[in-house]
Amino acid sequence: MIKNISKYYPLIPVLAVYLTMFLIGFYIPGMWQMVALLAFYCALGQSWNIFMGMTGYVDFGYVTFIALGTYGMALGISYTHQYEWLGIGIIFIGLIFALFLASLSALLESFIALRLRGAYFAIACISINEGLRHFIEGARIWGGSEGIIFYGALIQALGRETSNQLTAFWADFAVFIIAVLAATLNIYYMRSKIGYALTAVREDEDAAKVMGINTTKYKTIAFLTSGLLGAAVGAFAWGVKLAHVFPGDVFVIHYTIECIVIVLLGGAGTLLGPVVGGLIYGLSKYWLAVVLPGFQLLIFAPIIIIVIVIFPEGVIGFVKQKTKGTPLARYII
Amino acid sequence: MILQLLAGNLIHGLLLGGVYGVATMGLSLIFGVMNVVNVGHGAFIMVGAFITLTLFTALGISPVLAIPVALLMGMALGFFFFYTVMRRLIKAPELASLLATFAIGILLEEVVKLIFGADFRGYNWGLGKITLPITVIPISKIYAFNGSIVIALFLYFWFSKTRLGTAVRAVVEDSEGARVCGVNVGWIYALSFAIGIGLTVMSGVMLTMFIPVGINPYMGGVYTLKAFVIAVLGGLSSPYGAFFAGLIFGLIENGAYVLFAQIPGVAPFPLTVSLAFWMLFFLLLVKPTGLLGKK
Amino acid sequence: MALLKLENITKTFGGLVAVNDVSLEIEHGELIAIVGPNGAGKTTLFNVISGVYRPDKGKIIFEEKDITRMPAYKRAPLGLGRTFQIPRPFSSATVRENVAVGAMFGTLAGKVSVDDSLEIADRYIELVGLEAHKDKEAGTLTPVEKKMMEIARALAMKPKLLLMDEAMAGMHPRDIDEMVRFLKEIKEKENIAVVSMVEHIMRAVVGLAERVMVMHQGAKLVDAKTEEALTDPRVVEVYLGRPPEE
């Protein structure tokens, strides 16, 4: 499988960036929160890139995966915390719940993608998100609109010391791991049959079929991968870290937009793009929150517009053009 | 007893449906002409609500007069955004215009928040009510409904009888064909976008006649989502379809609310909203062109 | 066994009968031209064979297997290759990557790795004379280069039957002769049956095809050896509008 290791060299700059971020956060006091936030955006960006960047389909309700991931973790911990012998295992159970819920949603979207494209697909995905959120609130399942607060359950199962460590450090560390995993999957797909198939699907789905590509199979692979990664991010960055979940907090379309902006800014379909986009976006948001609190959206909105109109290939797309044919090109993909 | 409640609610639903219908006609028009989904739809409704609020509370102007004001201001906004942003995105992939309209929506929300603050506001028109055997109807709602009917009729005549309206319909059918027939398609795009936005802002006025409270910069989101459902129900490119779909939606929404409220242990309001989405979802799968659409 | 058998294929769109009861048999390694004026139903027939459309009536049998209901993507690995009249490259991918897609998902699907596919791609790119462009984005090629890439991509699939849709439209007569020679060479080397569809380029038809099927208004008019078919009075009438003067 990993026969030709030089194919994976482009992963090196990405890993270097993540490592640098981690070291800065770990050793410089006070930087961990910011670094964790950046890792969050990068991880989401890379996960979303597999969906939108590689297939060309836009799931406006992508946040559903993140939300389901959070709920999965919440439900997992809430239901199993009384079994003391499980110990730290309850976190893994939560993760499995999270991944399970996300895969249901991914399969549903695959099914929709059979029949809908473009704006119709985007709207259908939004409707899943909103429908699910309001159903939880309306039918009062999973805590209804009051959500689930499982901090207590966590402490009960693992003790105060461990719980604090989890929420303050290990949750964010997990996000780093997910980011690395997402980057690896990104490049693995790009270099394999899957990547070729998805490029074909993105460029000309009907021609792809005639060329022998089972478009449904590959789209499903992409949706599943992207959704599961997103759910994992949600499970840790929101689930374990905050130890609570409210439907009104998690099923919010703004997060999908953030993903889209990150990937567009950095360059959709590229490996480095989401990382760069995540960094730029995360840093800007953080800086704006400090300097001009309350005004972030006001500033971001016109910036989004400008980026879309003027800069559709994003930073990395632009850099790729400039470094074509140079040795650097091997690393900028 | 339930039936009476249901019937009363259905009447309210029908009245509200008219407002929903007009609110969605703008969305359908813009999609039909330019193939752009205005994701910031709700924000424009919110602008109309604030226009009404300001005119009434600051200047004492009746909301009825706010209607034409809102229309004109809406069209101005429409032209503005078209020439600054949307025009450059006609050739771009769909995602670009989806994001752009979303960003415009956010921009509007934030600007309004800057000017008016995030508090919830309202006004009291104080027109009184009509008492029917089964229910009580505030007169302002009747105004709102009448307004909707008048506007819908007016649009109907405009589309079918005037030159400009016909040109718009031609562009919806086939923009290349229309161009070849001498229609200035670029100008029609601008005009349609402006009218679409104008209609949307105007519907904000009528919405406040219905619900004169809870006016705040972020009120639009829910309406965007409902508008999507209605627009797809009526056929995404058919403004008339949108109007009738609005009526149907209003009926279903209120009817479902009453029925859900009978089930113990559930929260009827979010459940109704959830229903809207599952409706949209199945519609898209089964007949994306809507009940009344063509393509 | 015949490579491809079409039995009474009919396809209608609404009220229009695009393909009307067409039957045809193609043997391995044959070179056939399907000829007919615009609207005769040739493209629809190709679309039915490759699986873009389902026929309303009739059967498609490929090497004794009934593929009538088979989805398009399953037909390629069986050996059905196709080029399009207006080339459909995967624009943002390089020429090499485009052609490699053919190798990956054609008859060699599951037997070749990505690297093998790229090597196969290189061979065919050289064959069609595009090595100079192989790392360029496919979208930047000229129309003729795109056509050649289409052919390379289809060949990389190692098909048993190649459907070529108006491959020579818009070409200079000299290039057409080149193309004809090239296709003949391919057929020999790779033992592919080629079904070429042309509207009116008789130079290509005569040079290339051993057999010609003439279509008119969806139906098969004539199916015979080239000489015979082209001098058949019915064919002449369809093309010129009246029987030949004596």
Image (tube, helix red, strand yellow):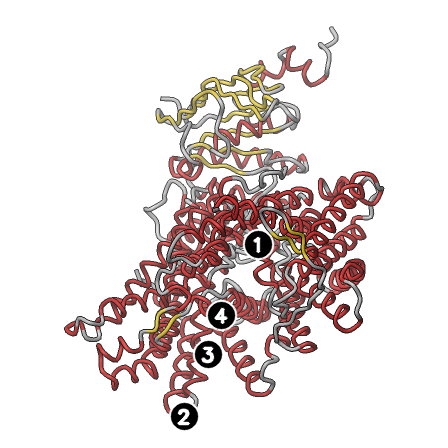
| Chain ID of residue with mark 2 | A
**Residue holding disc 1:** B226
Q: Amino acid at mark 2?
A: Ile
**Residue holding disc 4:** A274
Residues at marks 1 and 3, common chain? no
What is the spatial separation of the Cα atoms under label 1 and label 3, in whole angstroms?
Answer: 34 Å
Of the two numbered discs 1 and 3 in the rendering, the one whose residue sits closer to the viewer: 1
- Residue A177 screen position, x and y as percent: 34, 74
What is the spatial separation of the Cα atoms under label 3 and label 4, in whole angstroms?
Answer: 11 Å
- Assign a secondary structure to mark 3: helix
- Assign a secondary structure to mark 1: helix
Residue C158 vs C112, above or below: the answer is: above
- Residue A218 screen position, x and y as percent: 41, 50
What is the spatial separation of the Cα atoms under label 1 and label 2, in whole angstroms?
Answer: 48 Å
What is the spatial separation of the Cα atoms under label 1 and label 4, in whole angstroms?
Answer: 32 Å
Residue with the most extreme left position: A85
- Residue C61 screen position, x and y as percent: 40, 24
